[in-house]
Image (cartoon, grey):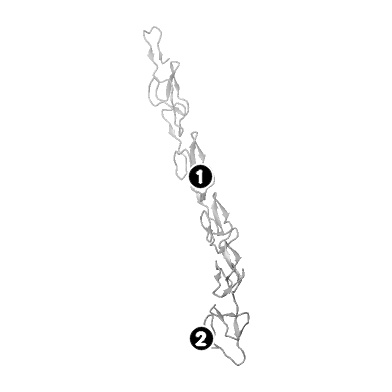
Amino acid sequence: STSTSTSGSSSCTSVTCPPGQYSNSRSCRQCPANSYKSETGTRTSCTSCSGTSTSTTGSSSCISVTCPPGQYTSSRSCRPCPANTYEAETGTRTSCTSCSDTSTSTTGSSSCISVTCPPGQYISSRSCTPCPANTYEAETGTRTSCTSCSDTSTSTTGSSSCISVTCPPGQYTSSRSCRPCPTNTYKSETGTDTSCTVCPDFSSSVAGSDRCACIGSMYWTESLQCLSCPPGSKVINNRTACNCPIGTSWNWTEQTSGSSRP
């Protein structure tokens, strides 16, 4: 009931309570903590404060719970921001902001710190992880991935650079490894070539060759051609020269493919 009367009264009088109090059993009682009543009246209850505000017993208003940097409001009190989150300003926020994927923080932080990884590593889940094989990272930084090596280079786990795949004569680079030159092709020098050279006309080779062999009575010239030896002469020096008969000579400047002039 919100009204009362005195002995001999012909009517009842409303129980009117001041701010901070409510009517209960025909008397005024103070609002409980974390509630308020701002006006004089006959209300039988007080209004609860919001989740980010509080009050003491008998309050006519609530006071916002203001938390310092590094903390947030929870259940009307200030709590430290969890690890990997932050709160930069004083305020009434009910949660903290997550750090980026390349930064981290400790409990109760007002800011995040960038995760900086040394050469040969990248950032994964806010920590430094070694670059996988066949990738690299050359500099200190905040990169979230490593760079792939080229098709002619390779690297081990945690590398800051790639190493060229260098193949010996008779082999070429394929998928970061050395493979034999196919039949009728050749590679004469050590290097990073990704293919072998096709043998010229009138020559052939077996797989893995560093040179081609001229067929028949032809010889291999410095210009990588197969030419015929003069009549009566023989191929010598692993098919790199001709042996003219005694008493004859060879006009080199007029020699053409498939013919001869003694």
Residue 207: x and y in percent read 61, 68
Q: Is residue 252 visible?
A: yes
Number of marks in the image?
A: 2
Would residue 75 appear left or right of 10 to someone viewing this image?
right
Q: Quick one: which residue is furthest to the front in this view?
A: 231
* Type of the residue with mark 2: Glu
Against 169, residue 115 (above or below) is above
Q: Nearer the viewer, residue 15 or 53?
A: 53
* Type of the residue with mark 1: Thr
Q: Quadrant of the N terminus?
A: top left
Q: Are marks 2 and 1 in contact (CB under 8 Å)?
A: no
**Which type of secondary structure does the marked residue at label 1 adopt?**
strand
- Residue at image coords 60%, 78%: 216
Label 2 vs 1, first from the N-terminus: 1
Query: Image quadrant of residue 236?
Result: bottom right
The residue wearing badge 1 is: 85
Residue 155: x and y in percent read 58, 61
The residue wearing badge 2 is: 254
Residue 247: x and y in percent read 60, 93
Q: Residues within 10 Å of mark 1 (few under 14, many from 20)?
A: many
Against 205, residue 71 (above or below) is above
Query: Image quadrant of residue 180?
Result: bottom right
Would residue 130 appear left or right of 100 to someone viewing this image?
right
- Residue at image coords 60%, 84%: 242
Q: Nearer the viewer, residue 245 or 145?
A: 245
Q: Quadrant of the C terminus?
A: bottom right
**Which type of secondary structure does the marked residue at label 2 adopt?**
helix
Q: Residues within 10 Å of mark 2 (few under 14, many from 20)?
A: few
Would residue 78 appear left or right of 6 to someone viewing this image?
right
The image's mark for residue 217 is none
Q: CA distance from mark 2 to mark 1?
A: 85 Å
Q: Quick one: which residue is furthest to the top in this view?
A: 8
